Image (cartoon, helix red, strand yellow):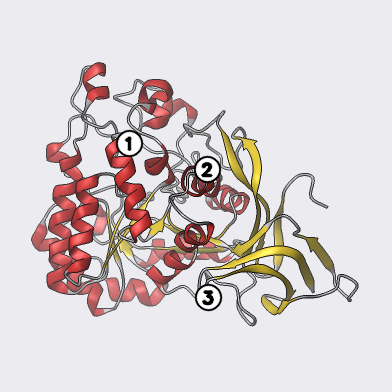
Amino acid sequence: MILIIGGRMIDPKTGIDEFRDLVIDGTRIKYIGKFHSGGAYDEVIDAHGKIIVPGLIDVHVHFRDPGFTYKEDMESGVASAIRGGFTTVVCMANTKPVIDNREILAEVLEKAGKAPIHVKTVAAVSKGFGGGELTDMAELKKMGAIGFSDDGVPLRDSAFLRRAMLAAKEIDAPISLHEEDPGLIGVAGINDGAVSADLGFTGAPAVSESSMVARDCMIAAATGAKVHIQHISCAESIAAVRLAKDLGARVSAEATPQHFSLTEEAVLNKGALAKLNPPLRTEKDRYAIIAGLRDGTIDMIATDHAPHSAEEKARPLTEAPSGMIGLETSLALGITNLVRTGHLTLLDLIHKMSLAPANLYGIPAGFLAEGGPANIAIFDERESWTVSDFSSKSSNSPFIGQTLAGKIKYTICRGKVLYRDKGQA
């Protein structure tokens, strides 16, 4: 058994924010209360001055396995997640080949099943990400896919999308959408605004996202499907989601730490490291995201962890791929830019990084309770650290060199201590 003693326990399911000790027995939490360290424990973790929370959950990661394992693979992606305090992740389907059939899904699930944390995956909405032929959603869900997404490629055909939503509704599975209309985009990954103008090209305007979000929210309202808007980036999109929720649509949304932490100005300093799909936008949009997180329009925080090699990111800005890694900096960015600034409480932040993501896919996690899963993260919200090295294979992060507050000290999954910060006994 493991005793975690002296920490401040935050449970988003009950709202408890109190000093509690936890006893872990096997893969479950056996007791929560007050205990003495002199018992017959295999290990005692001193959590005085630290926060005990459910293991974090990220519903949007790219582990690049199979097909792009020079960027990331299952093992390195899992290591990155563990270092960031995550005990559950959901992989996207834009691998090579795409996860659109039972054979590829079985391959991914076999690798995922060997991981020390819970690795889930979505399957593709359309075969080959072509946007024209539905995958066999019922079969893929039965095999273990927990939802469906063509993330990285928007579904432009509204009639096809409606069929996809109805098919997903039939099997009660969420469908997650990447919202960017390529027909309205010049150079992808850079906001169409002051920065792109200074750089001499047309970028990706906010309307390329908001027009699709508005359309898809209304189709969601009409079909009754469970629809999730991925990596929302602009004020107009947030307004559309807010309206859809008011109309009773089963719509949820996620925001990334990069979109609530940075603006398009980062491109001038960080170059391709700050090139993302959808792009970093204006300060007005950043504050709209924060307001959406605060009022519940944006339900959760997800990283869109997207590794690329140093050589790829070193290409000219207009040619470099979009995306950044984020698992190892996510919690600290939330503490630094949302909690310390007074926008969210720590309880709110943990809810958006654990219970809310679990609820999207019906994952039995994201809470701390006697008899519940022993998936736990322990962190020091006051400890400052400078972003430098990563457990990911890639290091494409615009936050390198930045000092953040909030450091993961332990990650525990299925009752096993998987990560122990240097200096911890």
In this orientation, which residue lies closer to the viewer: 158 or 123?
Answer: 158
User: Where does label 1 land, which residue?
Assistant: 280
Q: Secondary structure at mark 2?
A: helix
Q: Residue furthest left?
A: 159
Residue kind at label 2, given as amino acid type? Thr
Q: Write down the quadrant of residue 50 in the picture.
A: bottom right
User: Where does label 2 land, which residue?
Assistant: 336
Q: Quadrant of the N terminus?
A: bottom right
In this orientation, which residue lies closer to the viewer: 82 or 258?
Answer: 258
* Mark 2 vs 3: CB contact within 8 A: no
Q: Which mark is residue 44?
A: none
**Residue 25, percent across and down?**
74, 77
**Residue 180, percent across and down?**
21, 45
Q: Mark 1 vs mark 3: which is more N-terminal? A: 3
Tell me the distance, in whole angstroms, between the alpha carbons under discs 2 and 1: 18 Å
Circle 1 or circle 3, nearest the eye: 3
**Residue 336, percent across and down?**
52, 43
Residue kind at label 1, given as amino acid type? Leu
Residue kind at label 3, given as amino acid type? Thr
Q: Write down the quadrant of residue 413 in the picture.
A: bottom right
Q: Write down the quadrant of residue 39 in the picture.
A: bottom right
Is 395 on the left-hand or right-hand side of 132?
A: right
Is 103 on the left-hand or right-hand side of 253?
A: right
Tell me the distance, in whole angstroms, between the alpha carbons under discs 1 and 3: 35 Å
Q: Mark 2 vs mark 3: which is more N-terminal? A: 3
Please give the name of the residue rendered at 39% of the width and 24% of the height, measured from the top-left corner: 271
User: Where does label 3 land, which residue?
Assistant: 14
In this orientation, which residue lies closer to the viewer: 88 or 332?
Answer: 332
Please give the name of the residue rendered at 36% of the width and 61% of the height, measured from the top-left corner: 299
Q: Is residue 230 visible?
A: yes
Circle 2 or circle 1, nearest the eye: 2
